[in-house]
Image (cartoon, coloured by chain):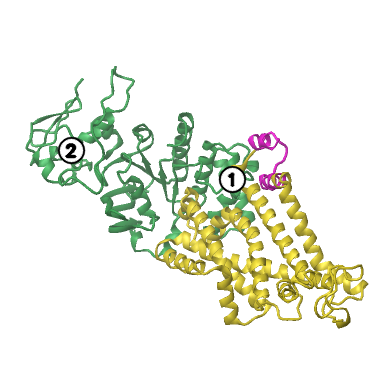
Chain colours: A green, B yellow
Amino acid sequence: MSANEIILDVKDLQTSFKTDTGEVRAVDGVSFQLPKGKTIGIVGESGSGKSITSLSILRLLASNGTIKNGEVLYKGQDLLKFSEAQMRKLRGNEISMIFQEPMTSLNPVYTVGQQISEALILHQNMSKKEAAVRSVELLKLVGIPSPDKRVKNYPFELSGGMRQRVMIAMSLACNPEILIADEPTTALDVTIQAQILELIKDLQERLGMSVIFITHDLGVVAETCDYVAVMYAGQVVEYADVRTLFKEPKLPYTIGLLNSLPRHDIEQDKLEPIQGNVPSPHNMPVGCRFAPRCPAATDLCRAKMPKLETDENGNQIRCWIYSEEWDGESEVNLYGETRIAKGRGTKTVLPD
Amino acid sequence: MSEETVNHPVTAKKINPRLESYKLFWRRLAKNKAAVTGGIMILLIILMAFIGPWIITNFTDFRPNETDLANKLQGPSAAHWFGTDSYGRDIFTRVIFGTKLTLYVGFFSVFIGGVIGVIFGIVSGYYGGRIDTVIMRLMDVLLAFPGILLALAIVAVLGGSLTNVIIAVGIFSVPAFARVVRGSTLSVRKLEYIDAVRALGSSDFRIIFKHILPNIMSPIIVQASLRIATAILTGAGLAFLGLGAQPPAPEWGAMLNEGRQYMYEAGHVALFPGLMIVLVVLAFNIFGDGVRDALDPKMKN
């Protein structure tokens, strides 16, 4: 298996929703590539379009949402051109998904065994008996103690962490190629979070899955992902491998995000948050969408939307500072860190 | 108590939570005296409907349609417990034979209305949009007619017979079910486990019948048990107007109508079938109320 084999290639995805107040473009030209066996993290604030991106991939949008444009190439085939029946065959079988809320993601009237069996019966033509046996194996795989007893439990009898494990078992039932994890640890407490992350990582290695990890938690990203796409207001604004992103974040927004995290290696009196709020989707800025909140924004930023540029390492950034057209200072101060604008050398100077 | 067993399923020996929830339902129902009374009355009525006629035909000489003009319009006595009607027929015998007809109207019409209403409601709530608008406006039209008038119109089109009354009352029950089911479907559809099963590749059909329907059974059961009373009343009303079971069938509503002419000389002719209608409707109503309370999770003590 070559390291560069791309299993999922999302190109210029645009998704919008019809609302009472007009059409809202929740995802506006998102592109990213998922290499086989790797994990890509999609990070962003609430409302940045990260969940909608994942739902668009599986075409599970609510009825008022439509995919306006773009391609979702899975093994070279465009999922957006698939029929509904073809999609049903794919969902849960080749691409599966774990949801945010383990407490409400299981049907209260069926046992966990029956729910894990569902995908097996649907996709693998298993009989109920075979599926029940496999359910026990899957529960064992996700680390649930005495799985043969648990398989007969109803969701209300399990704790949140256990339910999330059950959800993972459900999504792994058919050995999917891609697992989409939509904030799988948000609703869990920290110790359980670590266990679940560990479990997903471990299963990924064992089963050779590719994972799309959606989260707003940068700590989770650092721990689990190979690549990171930072989303802001429906767009990918920075894309880099995880080491680069944490060591040398370039985009003012990413630097701001990292800066607003507490750190234990340096002494801080106060965390510095990013000022302002995510722009309303009804009233998007004409220029760079982060410009109203950006400490370095210039007239250029406010007037024109920057393009997503790819550098020599394959990392991408959507910011005027790193383009030839930059009209501001050559040294830009961003949340206490200094970045050198493009054309005047791209070396990054760290403050300490 | 049950709360403990629920919290510690592993330590308890062997617990079937589904069975537990049935037990809880029965316990709550049993605590409600009115509901128990209603339930017992319903059981007795059912017993009366199916064993009563058999006892009468095998052990007495009374026949529901046997006329005896010499003994017409007699008051209650040892020989005729509920008296006789204008043809000298024994009213008690007729009441007993009529029970079955009343229950047929109640159960079958609710069954028909329930099935159609549930399908309409669930489709409406699940798909929403234009389908929802069309179905619910249709239901609004049905609801805009006073119930008896609607049933009357349907029977007038189909012709008067017991089957047509059942169909008419069934159609008349459809909107009530559709509304309740639509509301419940809307709230269940939003839940994440529906998204989760869709992400597993389930079809709409499977989601609707396997995942939504079992979760909205309680309101359907409550609606059905309360609806039976209304259906019986409407059925009797239609019979009273001469549109139900045709004479000489001993339908209570029809008997009430016959008795109406002798209201002043022989009130008992109308009194007993009327009383039976009241009793049956009352029994189903208080039982239905009890079921609703027992199934309502908010009523936890």
The C terminus of chain B lies in which quarter of the figure? top right
Mark 1, residues whose alpha carbon is within 10 Å: few (<14), some, or many (≥20)?
Answer: some
Q: Secondary structure at mark 2?
A: helix
Q: Is residue A303 above or below residue B101?
A: above
- Looking at the image, residue A34 sits to the left or right of residue A141; the answer is left
Mark 2 belongs to chain? A
Q: Which residue is mark 2?
A: A292
Q: Amino acid at mark 2?
A: Pro
Q: Is residue B284 left or right of residue A49?
A: right
Q: Is residue B104 above or below residue B17?
A: below
Identify the magenta region: B1-27
Whether B4 is among the magenta residues is yes
Which residue is located at x 59 percent, y 67 percent?
B113
Quarter of the picture holding the N terminus of chain B: top right
Viewer-proximal residue among B37 and A76 = B37
At which x and y percent is residue B77? Answer: 89, 68
Judging by the rendered image, the residue that carries numbered circle 1 is A137
Chain for numbered disc 1: A
Q: Is residue B119 above or below residue A98?
A: below
Q: CA distance from mark 2 to mark 1?
A: 53 Å
Extreme-front residue of the structure:
B264
Q: Is residue B193 visible in the rendered structure shown here?
A: yes
Q: Residue at x 27, y 32 (%)?
A: A257
Q: Is B6 within the magenta? A: yes
Q: Residue at x 28, y 30 (%)?
A: A258
Count of picture labels: 2
